[in-house]
Amino acid sequence: MYLKSLELQGFKSFPDKIKLDFNKGLTAVVGPNGSGKSNIGDAVRWVLGEQSSKTLRGAKMEDVIFAGTQMRKPVGFAQVTLNIDNSSGLLQIPSDEVSVTRKLYRSGDSEYLINGSQVRLKDIYELFMDTGLGRDGYSIIGQGRVAEIVSAKSNERREIFEEAAGISKLRYKKAEAERRLSAAQDNILRLNDIISELEGRVEPLRIQSEKAAKFLELAEKKKALEISVWISRLDELRDSLKEIDEKILINNTEYENIDNDITALEEEIQKSYNAMQSTRVRVEELQEKIVETERQSGQVNSDIAVYENDIAHSIETINNTISQQQGAAVSSIELRDRIASQNDRIAELEKEERESEELLSKLQSELENLNAEADKFDAEYEESGQSINKLYIRQSECNFTITSSETAETETAEHIKQSEEQLISVEQTVKSLKAEYDETAKGKAKTQELIDELGNKISGYTRLFESKNKKLTESKENLQQLIMKKNEYENKVNILNDLEKNMEGFAYSVKEVVRAGKNSRISGIHGTVAQLIKVDGKYSAAIETALGGALQNVVVENEETAKRCIRMLKEQNAGRATFLPITSVKGNTLRENGLDAQNGYVALASELVQYDEKYAGVVASLLGRIAVAEDIDLATNIAKKYGYKFRIVTLDGQVINAGGSFTGGSLAKSAGVLTRKNEIDGLNAELEKISNTVLALNADTSKLQSEVDKLSFDIEGYRDRLSTIGEDKVRFESEEKRIESLLTQGAEQEKAINAEISASKEKLALIKKQREDAISQLAECEAEIKRQEDMLAGRQGEKDNLHARREELSAKISQQKLKEVELRKDKENTLSGIEHLKESAENLKKSVLDLEEQIALHNDLIEQKKALIEKCRAELDGFVTKIEEYKAQIRAEQTSNLEFEKKSVELRNELKNKNEVKEKFSTEKTRFEARRESVQKDYDGIISGMWEEYELTRSDAEKIAVPVENLMVAQKELNEYKNKIRNLGTVNLSAIEEYAEVSQRYKFLSEQLSDVEMSKKELEKLISELTEDMRRRFSESFEEINSNFKQIFVELFGGGKAELVLTNPDDVLESGIEINVAPPGKVIKNLSLLSGGEQAFVAIAIYFAILRIKPAPFCILDEIEAALDDVNVTKYAQYLRNFTNTTQFILVTHRRGTMEEADMLYGVTMQEKGISKLLKMSHDDVNSMAGDM
């Protein structure tokens, strides 16, 4: 076995399709660094199933596809094919040449093919397992692998040793067996759980099932008896209703008659009542008249009493008035005397008053003259003083005006100067602010543009994110559901495969025979009928039914094989089996005219199965005379037509046997051995579809996840940027408002300052004029003050004398005026007293006249009241007469009313008797109606109960009912049935069917558990055997490799010592491997102390030691000699020759010594950047290339 050729297309730096043909021996691939020569080794590693992109020197698997250059577009896929000569048969494929292909698309989809047929990656691994060519083998060795063997930990060096020992496949088988053992243990746990649960249910369900059966039996008896009792009871109730209706009719007639009599009596009573009421009304009217007359009489008596009281009051008033007249006469005399005395006093006072007035007039005249003189002098003097004061005020005003004008003039000039300076500053600030405002407006506009742009981007990206995220969620959910479904299908397939492999459902004897055939103990065993035929799913039930136990018949080559099998079963006491020798079993096919044309006919059973032609006789003998029909009805028609001459099976498994017997019913829910095969095939097909869908959906999900993550990252970035720019915009807007406010303030300040400067200049001119006017006025004022002060000083003495005379005269006048006031006051008081006395005399005179009038008035009033009293007494006599008349009428009405009451009492007594009779009839009517209602309710209750309990109408129930001789006995028996049913308690009617299902499932699962436990034991045995075989093989191989390593090390290093040591000899399958070496003349405690070349040579020695005991068909060595010097390179290359008889070498190198040893040369160049070119070379070409390198 060797590598014939390698084909690449689109792989790494090889965009175009190329093919490298290889011969046995040494082939070297040379080229400068970076030309892509190592990509050839990567291509072989990749096609053998390498899944690590890092191992292939890439970041992701997509990197193996040619990515394009400036001049070349990228390609859509990478494809590598190994063409291997398999004439030795090392690869377990019946072909002299094997091609292995791997293809990867940019979408992530990949394909694996063996000889053009699509396979799984697992199939690739298994194909090369234990050949040294696997992904963990030692057929492809690069510089990194050389370093790993030396620098790796002791337990990480095992892979190549295990591959060399040939235990990789055994380890894989062991892992597979352990997985199946784990699955079996899981199944045992699951089955034990289910069986344990079923065990807990079977017995309760059996009890419940028996109780349910007893319940159904009692319920059926109860139903028959209860319906019969109900029908008998309905007949009784119907008769009772008829009797009650007759009694109600008679009672109603009597009730109506007495009711008519009562109506007549009530009318008579009403008439009598009406007459009595009329009498009562008239009596009440008369009584009201009496009351009214008596009220009027009482009113008249009250009037008389009032009048008499008025007369007495008037007499008393007259007497009092006469006494008052006598007192007034005495008072009048006393008042006249007092008035005369006061008049004399008035005459005296008037005389004194005249004397005082004359003196006062004289004094006042003198004072007036003196006052006139003084007033004139004072006016002149005051006028002079006021004039001087005004002049002083004016002088002060002028001084103040001059001083304040000078100050104001200085301040105003200074203020104008400051305002002008302030104006210049404000103008500069406004100019600066305007420039700043323009910059801010530009910044704001720019940020708004960015905000709009980012808002649009965020909006668009958000919509896209939501859409993608929704798709991602849906994709994940779909993927999860598919994975769950895939796991479910895989579990089912694994269980079914285990069942199939362990031949679950087959007899032990059959299993033993088939195992004997597989183990080659007995040759000529082909398998069971079930294993040798295939059938479409829709015909499975029919074929399984048709074959029945024959599915377990064993097909053998000939009679001798059958005999050997029987002997084996007999010797092992393994049971019995039926054998079908191909040479002796020759069946006949059913041939009936017109059978194909029969309605419902499907085909002969033998025509519905697929099988190898050599089993035609066996199939014909088993199925050739069995017809298959669509259903039992159509099958019956066919069987009748042909006289039940042959067996017919329906698609759902019902059977009409030859001779006319029928077999049928429900089929077991558990799958048969034939159905199981179909189920496995169907599940595998479905599983493959699901797996492909999962791969595609996984790729879509990953792609969507990447897109969603990128979108989310972009959106967050844009949002952060938008937030930052938004803050900038707010800052610009705030700054813009601030500048606008400052500009407004600046403009107002400019305006205010200009106005203030103008006003200040006007004010300054005015102040100057005021100061000059004030100076002129001050000089005039001071001259006038001096003149007037001189004149006023000479008249002060004259003024003082005049004032003293005037004050003396004023005092005399005041004394005289006071005396005059006192006299006047005394006179006024006296006059006032006289007036009061006169007024009192006049009032007294009036009072006497008023008293006389009152006396006359009261006398007239007394006469009027006496006349009214006489009139009232006459009215009282009339009232007494009326009252007597009214009373006589009342007595007459009362006599008439007594007669009506007597008649009314008689009528009421009669009415009472009639009502008692009516009440009796009414009670009877109520009793009858209640009785009828009760009977009707019982009747309706029975009718309703029959419908609710059994959904029967009376007519339906009468058909079922039987005559009941004694209703009480029947009712007693019915109660006994009810009590028995009640004593049963809660009944689970579904328990009957559930018990049948559970017990059947319990039996099936128990058998399954037994089979799985047996399978577990077999797996444990297999694992033990595999472990022992692996341990043995590894130990033997390791010893050989160690021996070879010691020898080769000495040969390569020219001496020294080397050894491979297991770190844990007691557990060789898990032990690490230590490398102990000592080159000539050196003592090395750690491999890291070796030089790079020495480390490389140690690793090469180990690989050579492995190749010596387990040669790989071909080996790719990628610059593993790079660290060696020229002498050792030559030694290395020459040493390779020792292995060329068993191993084909492809050497990727740039060392001359290796090139010179090669039998065949390929050169790799990169004339166009990024694209590798391949060409065959001679040794001369190599020499020139080596010179260039």
Image (cartoon, rainbow, N blue to C red):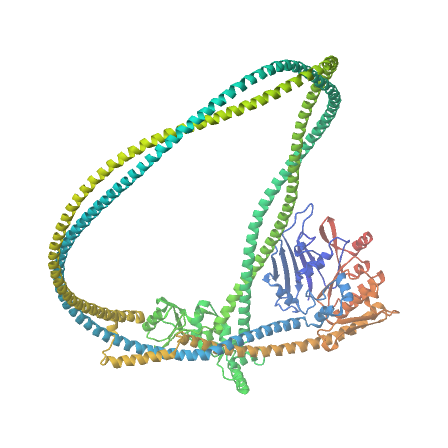
In the displayed structure, does residue 735 sit left or right of residue 479? right
Out of 727 and 1088, give the one closest to the viewer: 727
The picture quadrant where one finds residue 149 is bottom right
Q: Quadrant of the N terminus?
A: bottom right
Out of 517 and 430, give the one closest to the viewer: 430
In the displayed structure, does residue 416 sit left or right of residue 498? right
Instruction: Residue 584: give x, y in percent of width and height.
Output: 47, 79
Residue at the spot 62% in from the left edge and 73% down from the top edge: 178
When the figure is inspected, residue 897 is found, relative to residue 584, above or below; the finding is above
Instruction: Residue 663: give x, y in percent of width and height.
Output: 38, 76
Q: Residue furthest right?
A: 1081
When the figure is inspected, residue 52 is found, relative to residue 448, above or below; the finding is below
The picture quadrant where one finds residue 213 is bottom left
Instruction: Residue 731: give x, y in percent of width and height.
Output: 66, 39
Count the labels in the image: 0
Instruction: Residue 672: give x, y in percent of width and height.
Output: 47, 73
When the figure is inspected, residue 468 is found, relative to residue 678, above or below; the finding is above
Out of 564 and 864, give the one closest to the viewer: 864
Out of 687 and 1183, give the one closest to the viewer: 687
The picture quadrant where one finds residue 1064 is bottom right
In the displayed structure, does residue 757 sit left or right of residue 976? right
In the displayed structure, does residue 845 sit left or right of residue 885? right
Residue 501 visible in rendering? no
Residue 1036 visible in rendering? yes
